């Protein structure tokens, strides 16, 4: 079965999933729960189910119903129009007097979805009029009479909110666009300024797809509607190349920051980038595509169909070798038997984890030495006073030394100095990431060979003895075998007997799972380790 037929079958399954969906009112008590205990998921699960229903029914109308509306689609549109706010409680202050006028990621996405659906589908005039009036009240009027913090930020909020607001103007209020054009384009410039010249998204692969995706959606519409070409900017091409560089072995991806260990990609967006930028864009294997996310975002799902190009095939799997991204200080090396990624950077990055000097080792199926990526999003996950109490954001949950019980600290000054990132070697100085005055230097040295990876950490100590614990993290339970540790086809050799500890952790969906730390305690000033890979049987 060809990929487009697979996509149509997936759409049919999505439509059937929401066929009998009950458009109940969103629960105000669950909205308020965020303010009581920081829980986001109970309300958001209901909120995003409604968006799933909207996306499924609207896409079905476009693909299977010749862009004609039906009662079920009109019912869910009416239900969204009845919501007391389109913003999420995590983004609405508890004492906000008019939550319906808050422009956050999701109010902007909802407005964009409704006006684009009204553009593509023949909905009744009265319903379109209601959409038009609500978007004016909730997006246009608040935007024109207020300023928002995301207009000056250098991350996904600028692209998503700015891009969605821009698309709303172009679809529903084109006569007002020139009055806000300079302001909107300034926000988009702020978003692009968050990327270095190497094109790396410090927030991770998923946030690249999110923020850069909405930038592309807006830029493509802006070019068609106003002949303004943001895609011609030099940096945009480098950013477009980020996605395929983040795939390691198979569908395993780099998960630094709040990333995901098993990457996926939007086929329509990727095909558009291929058409726009040519051979510099590689297409991942179709097995790793995922055209709708857990939020059922309309904009990306629509374009996974209308930008789909059946003549383009995957060409990523043969990608091997090493690359270094100097602005981000990310090093990636793809061998035949394994892939490796390590990072320098600092501990004040977007969606920051205290992870300077951490690394990932992956085979075809899994990360073996893991970077956990994003945990459950709660109020304290984004509170600077409590963020690093979470295992996945603390250096306690990364593949890093622990010095006299001290973990890495947060802050821009807690940074790596990369000494070498070429010739199958990555060397970095990490001492400034730790607040341990007696430790003047920590040199981390990786040397990569065809079937093994050598790690050497050297510590420059000033007086006294220090307890240093080298920690590696795994989702698979490590096996002790004659003093060595085995994780799948990987063997860790150190000459030291480790301590293995189970840690409960909440994943991004709020479900609890177990991760394992493998701890090697040393008494000297140097630690050496070999990660050895067996040949595939």
Image (cartoon, rainbow, N blue to C red):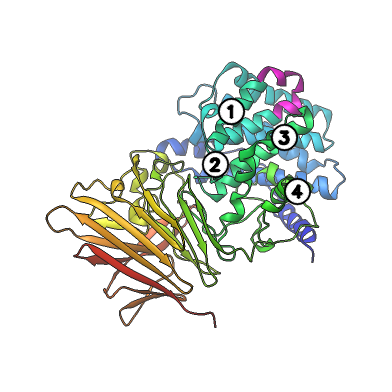
Percent x, y of residue 409: 30, 45
Q: Is residue 111 above or below residue 374?
A: above
What element does badge 1 sit on?
helix
Which sits earlier in the primary sequence, circle 3 or circle 2?
3
The C terminus lies in quadrant: bottom right
Of circles 1 and 3, the one toward us is 1
Please name the residue that numbered disc 1 is placed on: 187
What element does badge 2 sit on?
loop
Which sits earlier in the primary sequence, circle 1 or circle 4?
1
**Is residue 173 on the magenta stretch?**
yes
The N terminus lies in quadrant: bottom right
Percent x, y of residue 415: 35, 45
Of circles 4 and 2, the one toward us is 2
Q: CA distance from mark 4 to mark 3?
A: 28 Å
Query: Along the horizontal axis of the image, is 192 left or right of 229?
Result: left
Which sits earlier in the primary sequence, circle 1 or circle 2?
1
Please name the residue that numbered disc 3 is placed on: 114
**Which disc is residue 197 wearing?**
2
Q: Magenta span covers which residues? A: 168-180
Percent x, y of residue 15: 74, 52
Please name the residue that numbered disc 4 is placed on: 275
Furthest toward the front, the residue is: 423
Of circles 4 and 3, the one toward us is 4
Task: Please name whichever residue, 399 or 332, is drawn nearer the observer in this view of the structure.
Answer: 332
Task: Please name whichever residue, 411 or 175, is drawn nearer the observer in this view of the structure.
Answer: 411
Q: CA distance from mark 1 to mark 2?
A: 19 Å
Q: Quadrant of residue 403?
A: bottom left
Q: CA distance from mark 1 to mark 4?
A: 26 Å
Task: Please name whichever residue, 233 or 351, is drawn nearer the observer in this view of the structure.
Answer: 233
Asked if one can make out residue 24 in the rendered structure from this viewpoint, the answer is no
What element does badge 3 sit on?
helix
């Amino acid at each position: 079965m060809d990929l487009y037929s697979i996509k149509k079958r997936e759409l049919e399954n999505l439509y059937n999933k929401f066929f009998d969906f009950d458009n109940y009112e969103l629960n105000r008590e669950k909205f308020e729960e965020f303010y009581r205990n920081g829980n986001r998921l109970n309300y958001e699960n209901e909120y995003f189910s409604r968006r799933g229903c909207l996306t499924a029914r609207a896409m079905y109308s476009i693909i299977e119903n010749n862009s004609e509306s039906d009662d079920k689609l009109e019912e869910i549109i009416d239900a969204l129009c009845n919501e007391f706010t389109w913003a999420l409680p995590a983004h609405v202050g508890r004492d906000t007097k008019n939550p319906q006028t808050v422009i956050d990621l999701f109010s902007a996405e909802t407005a964009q979805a409704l006006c684009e659906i009204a553009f593509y589908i023949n909905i009744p005039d009265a319903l379109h009029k209601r959409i038009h009036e609500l978007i004016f009240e909730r997006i246009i009027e608040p935007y024109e009479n207020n300023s928002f913090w995301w207009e000056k930020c250098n991350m996904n909020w600028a692209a998503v909110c700015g891009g969605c607001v821009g698309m709303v103007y172009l679809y529903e209020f084109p006569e007002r666009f020139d009055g806000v054009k300079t302001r909107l384009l300034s926000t988009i410039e702020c978003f692009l300024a968050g990327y270095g010249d190497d094109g790396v998204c410090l927030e991770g692969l998923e946030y690249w797809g999110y923020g850069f995706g909405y930038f592309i959606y807006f830029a493509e519409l802006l070019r068609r509607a106003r002949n303004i070409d943001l895609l011609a900017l030099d940096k945009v091409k480098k950013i477009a190349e980020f996605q395929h560089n983040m795939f390691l072995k198979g569908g395993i991806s780099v998960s630094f920051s709040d990333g995901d260990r098993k990457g996926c990609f939007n086929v329509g967006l990727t095909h558009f980038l291929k058409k726009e930028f040519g051979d510099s864009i590689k297409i991942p294997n179709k097995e790793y595509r995922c055209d709708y996310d857990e939020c059922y975002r309309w904009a990306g799902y629509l374009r996974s169909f209308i930008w789909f190009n059946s003549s383009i095939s995957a060409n990523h799997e043969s990608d091997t070798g090493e690359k270094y991204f100097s602005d981000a200080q990310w090093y990636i090396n793809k061998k035949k038997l394994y892939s490796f990624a390590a990072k320098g950077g600092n501990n004040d990055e977007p969606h920051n984890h205290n992870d300077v000097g951490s690394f990932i080792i992956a085979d075809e199926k899994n990360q073996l030495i893991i970077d956990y990526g994003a945990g459950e999003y709660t109020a304290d996950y984004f509170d600077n006073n409590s963020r690093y109490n979470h295992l996945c954001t603390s250096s306690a949950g990364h593949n890093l030394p622990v010095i006299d019980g001290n973990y890495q600290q947060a802050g821009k000054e807690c940074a790596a100095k990369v000494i070498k990132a070429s010739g199958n070697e990555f060397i970095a100085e990490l001492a400034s990431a730790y607040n341990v005055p007696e430790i003047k230097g920590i040199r981390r040295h990786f040397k990569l060979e065809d079937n093994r990876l050598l790690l050497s950490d050297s510590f420059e100590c000033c007086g006294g003895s220090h307890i240093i614990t080298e920690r590696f993290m795994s989702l698979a339970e490590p096996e002790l075998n004659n003093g060595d540790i085995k994780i799948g086809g990987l063997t860790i050799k150190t000459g030291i007997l480790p301590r293995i500890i189970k840690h409960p952790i909440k994943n991004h969906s709020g479900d609890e799972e177990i991760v394992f730390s493998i701890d090697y305690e040393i008494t000297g000033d140097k630690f050496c380790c070999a990660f050895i890979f067996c040949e595939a049987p």
